Image: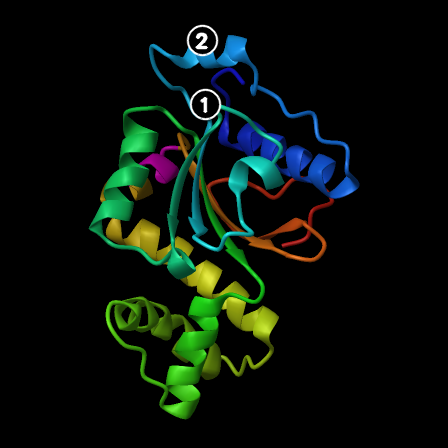
Amino acid sequence: MPRTSPALALDALLDGNRRFVSGTPEHPNQDAARRTELAPGQDPFAVILGCSDSRLAAEIIFDRGLGDLFVVRTAGHVIGPEVLGSVEYATSVLGARLVVVLGHDSCGAVAAARAAVEEGFSAGGFVRDVVERVTPSILAARTAGLTADSDIIDEHIRHTVDLLLDRSRLLSDQVAAGETAVVGLGYQLAEGSARLVTTRGVAAPEGTPV
């Protein structure tokens, strides 16, 4: 799609997700002509910072195609320097207008961090680093009295959005200037639907609960 505003970018994603849920995807920008068009360069309209879970393929669940989305994926959508640099590159160099933190139910990273806090479970290797980066979200949820899995997932999504803006001055300045927006979406594996959890720099579309 052509260069757009953060609000239109969010509308495009949510519209695509509705098509996916209803079983009527359009599969845009997935043909040979699009492939040829993109060979000289890319112009994505949104960045997706999502969990690495194999069931969370962004181009499929948002019914988009080649060149539409700049996708960064880590287990539990945890953030490190490489993630921050990738997001900043997409917004400042490629001109993406929307950053989406995409979490989901039945997240293994969140479950492992919750087990570490509640049961003293200790992961080995670099998995421990992922668990430790998710743990602040678990502790924040406990402080707020949240116990349901869905509420804890939402808290982790909100925490990741806040962390992006706290750690990236470039991104926070873009949001303050109205150039870019950051939103958190929670994906439901069984239904295939993505719902808004939190927004920064853009209003939720009319009729969309947050």
In depth, the one of 29 and 210 nearer the eye is 29
Mark 1 residue crowding within 10 angstroms, few (<14) / some (14–19) / many (20+): many
In depth, the one of 52 and 186 nearer the eye is 52
Rendered location of residue 3, percent (x, y): 47, 18
Circle nearer the N terminus (2, 1): 2
Q: Residue furthest bottom?
A: 119
Which quadrant holds the N terminus?
top right
Q: Which residue is mark 1?
A: 67
Q: Is residue 68 magenta?
A: no
Q: Is residue 58 left or right of residue 71?
A: right
Specify the principal SS of the magenta part. Answer: helix
Type of amino acid at the residue the image marks with label 1:
Gly
**In the figure, residue 189 lies in which quadrant?**
bottom right
Q: Which residue is mark 2?
A: 37
Q: Is residue 176 magenta?
A: yes
Rendered location of residue 114, percent (x, y): 44, 80
- The span shown in magenta is 173-177
Residue at mark 2 to residue at mark 1: CA–CA distance: 10 Å
Rendered location of residue 55, percent (x, y): 56, 52
**Do the numbered discs 2 and 1 sit on residues whose CB atoms are within 8 Å?**
yes
**Circle 1: element type:** loop
Type of amino acid at the residue the image marks with label 2:
Glu
Rendered location of residue 5, percent (x, y): 50, 25
Q: Is residue 195 left or right of residue 40?
A: right
**In the figure, residue 160 lies in which quadrant?**
bottom left
**Circle 2: element type:** helix
Q: Is residue 12 above or below residue 185?
A: above
Which residue is rendered at x = 68% and y = 52% of the image?
209
State the scheme by which the image is colored: rainbow
Q: Is residue 29 above or below residue 96?
A: above
Q: Is residue 63 left or right of residue 184?
A: right
